[in-house]
Image: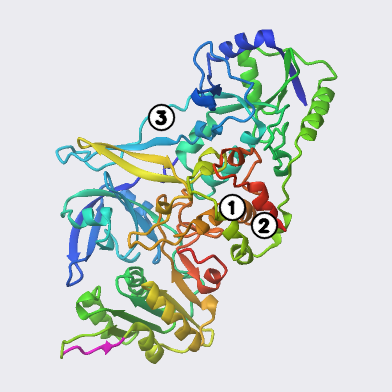
Amino acid sequence: MINPYLPFPIRIEDIIVESEDRSLKTFKFVFLNPEDEEKFSYKAGQFAEISIPGQGEIPIGIASSPVEKGFIAFTVNRAGKVTSHLHNMKVGDVLGVRGPLGNPYPWDTMKGKNLLFIGGGFAFTTLRSSVVYLLHPDNRDKYGTIDVVYGSRSPGMLLYLDELQKWEARDDINMHITVDGTDDPNWKYNVGFVPPIAEEKAPKSAGDTYAIVCGPPIMIKFTLPVLEKLGYDHDHIILSLENRMKCGIGMCGRCGIGEQLVCKDGPVFTLAEVNNTPKEF
Amino acid sequence: MRILQIRKTDWAAGLEKSRKDHSLIGPVRERNNTSKFRELEVGEEPDFSITTTTMSPKSVVFPQSEVMFTYTTDKASPECNIMKVPKNDYSPRAIIGIRPFDAAAMNIVKKNFDTPDYRDPYWCDAYEACTFIGLAVTNPDSCDFSTSTNSGPFSTAGLDVLLVDTGDSFLAEVVTEKGASWMRSAGFDTKADHDAEETIATMRKEAEKKITSTVEFDNIDKKETLDLYNENFWESISFPCLNCGTCTYVCPTCWCFDIQDETAHKKGRRMKNWDSCMFPNFTIHTTGHNPRNTKLMRVRQRFMHKLKYHQSKYNQGIMCVGCGRCVTSCPVNIDIREVCKQMNS
């Protein structure tokens, strides 16, 4: 019997400090047993439990993309016991990962449609995974236009800045980068909170566009009315929920919202689905 | 229906005989007038005078605390930070005297731990090692409402053998091949008289008649989740609750658990421990945000899960077998039957 609680052993291959306050780091992991990489076959939008013996486990969205091979990557905010310990670990250290867990974004349903990604703060990880997947030559033709509205507090808090700039230069994706505020006179992108920037820049929908929204609760709260105004139906607005988790496989019971378990039935839900469940997230 | 007869004078010897290929687990009295299921020592008999043990036998397959993995955090070791599966004992065991409602609870909990997507190997392996030798309830406790929950006093759902106490002997209804195998192993092979089936049916009717408390939950299924969730009655239902969690610990169908690492001197183990939706820590996020931050929300979660969510999700009744333990154990007399009535009305 496969033990779904048993982590795959992984080694830290690289650590990239992502933010100016050093609270966000991207960890690149390689599998100790190469055959485990195949077992960890994932799609953009899924998450995994990073497992550090003696510290515990944390559910984190997968930031690397299925089209990137030979490693997996997670961007981790230093917040609690496990993440603080992880932030102090070094290249070469061994730990574990369980997954992939949960459902990805509905890639089959979204085929042929336009896509709008709205991200805020460090909740851009699975969106990064998605964009890298979509921009791959094998996948780009399968979807319509791609718009990305991504904002953070300041330029130094934006994740994956090099990649954002590369995407900015492409003509098959429309980037709308924004920061809440900056005193950098050379800042060439938008200044403003995500919801108003989305209202100004995001494409209207006539049922042909899906919006995938990931960000802090306050951003989501003010973004949803904007999307409604732009014509997005509730079943075309896709959210990725977070709740406290332990098992990640629908058994330990703590991430439940009504009949649904965020870990197994989610974390990806449409707004229409979320509207029908208790708001316990 | 295959029915055998076991004379009580042969009972103890048969039990001992079955130990050659089964360990035995049964109900026993503990200190302070509490009772539970645990492994029986050689010569020790299960105490059939207890109808509803204080703690349910769920711990037989779902221990309160269980080692999932062991590990070392010693960097000098090549195995540093790599989880090892412990060698757990899953040799055959017979659960003697489990009551029909508790066996029915096993079937409910199985839906959680044995799914098409994932199987919890600890629960599944322990469950498969068990042969459930049930004992029919002939004198139901006052809080028993199992006839309402499809797990009545003579129900064989989840059992391998059902024993019926007829005074100087047991009638044993053999339900599964696993049960037949234990009966052979114990040397119980005397065919019961031709009227045994009738005797069981009569005793069953008598026992069912003694259960006077009932619940109805058909309307709960028809109601919208959010309508029930937003009802005003949660305020009064949850008002006396202390969030002590006793109801979840004694409940045979409560399966929520926690995973915790324990390390000492660079050696450690990852544990699976019972948890409870009554505790704020169950759901609190690292940020301090708690999606169920009030007592009302936690009490509501427990009843909604048992009586609404489970019913809607599986369409196989409620997540309750009517054992009455939560009713008897609650220090402030919260009664699931009353809650069910309010939700169903």
For residue B282, above or below residue B165: below
Numbered disc 1: what chain?
A: B
Q: Position of residue B139 (x, y in %)?
A: 72, 27
Is residue A90 or residue B105 the one in the foreground? B105
For residue A6, above or below residue A179: above
For residue A102, above or below residue A276: above
Q: Are marks 2 and 3 on the same chain?
A: yes
- Name the residue tied to disc 3: B88
| Mark pair 1, 2: CA separation | 9 Å
User: The disc labelled 3 sits on which kind of residue?
Assistant: Asn
Numbered disc 2: what chain?
A: B
- Name the residue tied to disc 1: B303
Please say whether residue A54 is visible from this viewpoint.
yes
- Give the foreground label among 2 and 3: 2
Contact, mark 1 vs mark 2 (Cβ under 8 Å): yes
At mark 3, the secondary structure is: loop
Task: Please report the residue visible at 27 percent of the width from the left and 89 percent of the height from the top.
Answer: A190
Q: Which residues are magenta?
A: A186-192
Task: Please report the residue visible at 35 percent of the width from the left and 36 percent of the height from the top.
Answer: B85
At mark 1, the secondary structure is: helix
Please say whether residue A115 is visible from this viewpoint.
no
Query: Which quadrant of the structure image shows residue B193?
Result: top right
Tag on residue B343?
Answer: 2
Answer with mark 3 or mark 1, whichever residue precedes in sequence: 3
Numbered disc 3: what chain?
A: B
Contact, mark 2 vs mark 3 (Cβ under 8 Å): no
